[in-house]
Image: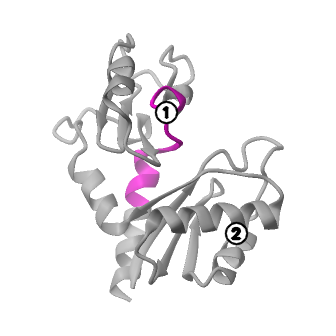
Amino acid sequence: MNVVISLLRAVNLGAHNRIKMDALCGLYESLDLREPKSYVQSGNVVFKTRERDVVRLARRIEKGIEDTFGFHTDVVLRTAADLRDVLARNPFRARPEIHPGKLLVLFLAGEPGEKARENVRRIKTDPEELWIDGREVYMYFPNGMGRSKLPWTRLDKMLETAGTARNWNSVTKLLQMAEKMEQS
C-alpha cells in the first residue's frame, strides 16, 4: 500500500471551512483510505491507500469533503517518497542559520507552466527568498511572515494551479508520520 499525505487548503482559518480532524479522518475511512492520522488542525492527513492515481484520489477526497462538510477545498497529495524528495531538494538545507519556523513550502497541485514561473520569478522578494522547484515553492522569511511584502498567499493563483503552504516543522513532522506508517 502507498502512504500518502493530504494537505487541505484553507481549512480551519477563522470561522470559515471548519472541520474537526476526527470527522475528517472518519471521512477518509469512509472513502476506503486506511489508518488516517491527522496532524494539527490545518487539514493534514497521512493515510494508506491502494490507489495509485493521486489526481483521481484528490478529486475523490475533495468531493467527499464537499458532500460531507458543505464546502469545496483543494486537496494536494504527496506520497511519502515525494515528501522525502521535497526535503532533499530544499534549497536552504546547507544554511544552518535558516530557522525552520520561517521556512515555508507551497505544495502545488500541478506543475506550473514556464510563463507563470517566469512571472513569479520577477517578483521582488528581498529580504525574503523564493525558489520554485517542480511542484513546490520554497520561501524563507528571515523577519517572519507577518510583515512580509511577498504576496505568498497569492502565489498559487499566479502559478495557475491550486496550492497550500506548510512550514518546515510541519513538513518534517508529516514525513516522520508517513515513514512510521510505511514501517507498520
Residue shown at the point (34%, 27%) measured from the top left = 117
**3D distance between C-alphas at marks 1 and 2:** 27 Å
Q: Position of residue 148 (x, y in %)?
A: 50, 17
Q: Residue furthest left?
A: 94
> What secondary structure is found at the residue carrying circle 2?
helix
Depth order, front residue of 67/184:
67
Tell me the magenta residue range. 157-173
Q: Quadrant of the C terminus?
A: bottom left
| Disc 2 crowd, CA 10 A, few/some/many (<14, 14-19, 20+) | many
Percent across and percent down for residue 155 are: 49, 28
In this view, 43 is above or below 183: above
In the drawing, what numbered circle is on residue 75? none
Magenta-colored stretch includes residue 163: yes
Q: Foreground: 102 or 157?
A: 157
Q: Secondary structure at mark 1?
A: loop
Image: 141 above or below 51:
above
Q: Earlier in the sequence, mark 1 or mark 2?
A: 2
Q: Residue at x 48, y 61 (%)?
A: 55
Report the residue at 37% width, 68% height from top.
176
* Amino acid type, callout 1: Glu
| Furthest-bottom residue in this view | 184
Q: Label 2 sits on what residue type?
A: Leu
71 to 93, vertically: above or below = below
Rendered view: 158 above or below 59: above
Q: Which residue is mark 1?
A: 160
The picture places residue 101, in percent across and down from the top left corner, at: 44, 40
Quadrant in the picture for the N terminus: bottom left
- Count of number-bearing discs: 2
Relative to 65, 7 lies left or right = left
Residue tagged by mark 2? Answer: 24
Dividing the picture into quadrants, the one containing residue 95 is top left
- Point out residue 144 in the picture as x, y percentages from the top left corner: 48, 25
